[in-house]
Image (tube, rainbow, N blue to C red):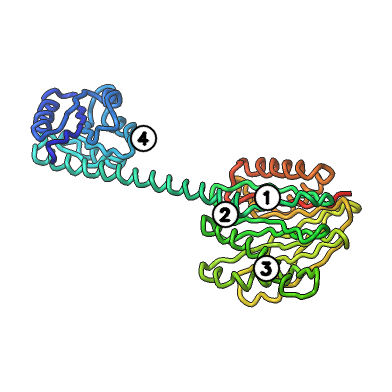
Amino acid sequence: MNQNISEKILVADDDRVVRTLLQYNLKKAGYTVILVENGIEVLENMTMEIGVVLLDLQMPKMDGINCLKHLRKEYPDLAPVMITASDDISDAVEAMKYGAFDYLVKPVKPKQLLALVEKVLQNWKQSKRLRQVEKELVRAREREIYIASRIQRTLLLGKPPVDMPEIEITQFTIPSQQVDGDFFDFFKINDKILDIVVGDVMGKGIASALLGAAMKSHFLRAINELALSNSEHGFIPEPGDIVSRVHSAMISHMEDIETFVTLCYARIDLEKSLINFVDCGHMRTIHYRSSLKNIRLLEGVNMPLGLPETDPFEQITVSYIPGDFFFFYSDGLTEAQNKEGEQFGETRLVKKIQEYAEFGQKQIIDRIYKDVVNFAQSDSFDDDFTCVVAGIKK
């Protein structure tokens, strides 16, 4: 033992002679010794600096086993040593079930005492080191989540154009406890055409967030490259061709990290009153039809991006009228679970949207968010809660 460091040891025994002998042998070895007579005094004198506690099994006011139970709750790194008379070994063994490190039999032999104390101290120090490592890992994880959430906010979540008065866009995202790869963006093609992409990278963490950011930037690049490659003035590439270009550019990266991306790429054409969309395994887009006051679910036939042999990407065209709106969302909304493991689900979401359809878009989202929180009995989710509503003004 390093004599320059005086480790603290607490000795609890109601026998003055035993306390004195233990103190003598421990102080001789260089330890600092604190003496008490029962379990109550142990708890009153206990501190984080005490590495070893020697507990007599039979003590007044509070015996060794009851004291041990209290210590293990308050000081999980501590593993006390029980002291017992020769005919109490069964009780000492029982105490080990509650977290005692070992036991000593009276009369305690000095060499056995010091060897066991040194072993307990090593175990205590190792437990503290492991606890510290765990805290550092938690801090590192929290830092990762913070960084990824910044990435998500700055790179993954786009802002809608402010100069298209015929379209009202409302978006809402609640990051989960873990960082996911939800992303969305808006591309104004001209004064009458707006493209919207909403996607979800499989997996969590910074890698998914970065892939989502890369995916989003590739859509803008694909639009520009396809437009420039055609000599026709004012040429506008089709959504299917845009998605295909992005898939070709990104599939090798997705294969390398063994992931895929579900997404919906939608084009709102104000002049033709049409929406053309490419659905790649994403959640079905909810189309509220104001004239009929009902909902239809828009679903494509394409596989997610990142899976081989998915070209060509088919697009679907549907009509709309002013007053309609389109509700895009990620699976974090419908897969929110209650305590029984039941999911919020698409059916419940559709019912809620139809119920709230006459309210403004922000109120629709706010009410649905409250419904999900009430359903899950929690305002934190295992997956990102993301939705984008695009409404056609009357």
**Which one is nearer the viewer's eye here, 377 or 146?**
146
Residue at 68%, 70% in the rendered image: 225
Instruction: State the separation of the CA atoms marked 1 and 3.
Output: 36 Å
Label 2, label 1: how many angstroms apart (C-alpha)?
A: 19 Å
Residue 187 screen position, x and y as percent: 72, 59
**Towards the viewer: 284 or 221:** 221
Density class for disc 2 (Cα within 10 Å; few <14, some 14-19, many ≥20) is many
Left or right, 377 with reference to 285: left
Gap between marks 1 and 4, in whole Å? 38 Å
Quadrant in the picture for residue 278:
bottom right
Q: Is residue 25 left or right of residue 371?
A: left
From this view, report whether residue 361 is shown above or below residue 13. below
User: Which residue was labeled with disc 1?
Assistant: 344
Horizontal and vertical percent position of residue 357: 82, 46
Q: Quadrant of residue 19?
A: top left
Residue pictured at 81% horizontal, 48% vertical: 354
For label 3, the residue is 222
Mark 3 surroundings within 10 Å by alpha-carbon count, few (fewer than 14), some (14 through 19), many (20 or more): many
Secondary structure of the residue carrying tag 4 is helix
Does residue 225 sit above or below 132 in this rendering? Answer: below
Between 341 and 261, the one lying in front of the other is 261
Between the residue at mark 3 and the residue at mark 2, the CA separation in whole angstroms equals 24 Å
Q: Give the quadrant of the N terminus.
A: top left
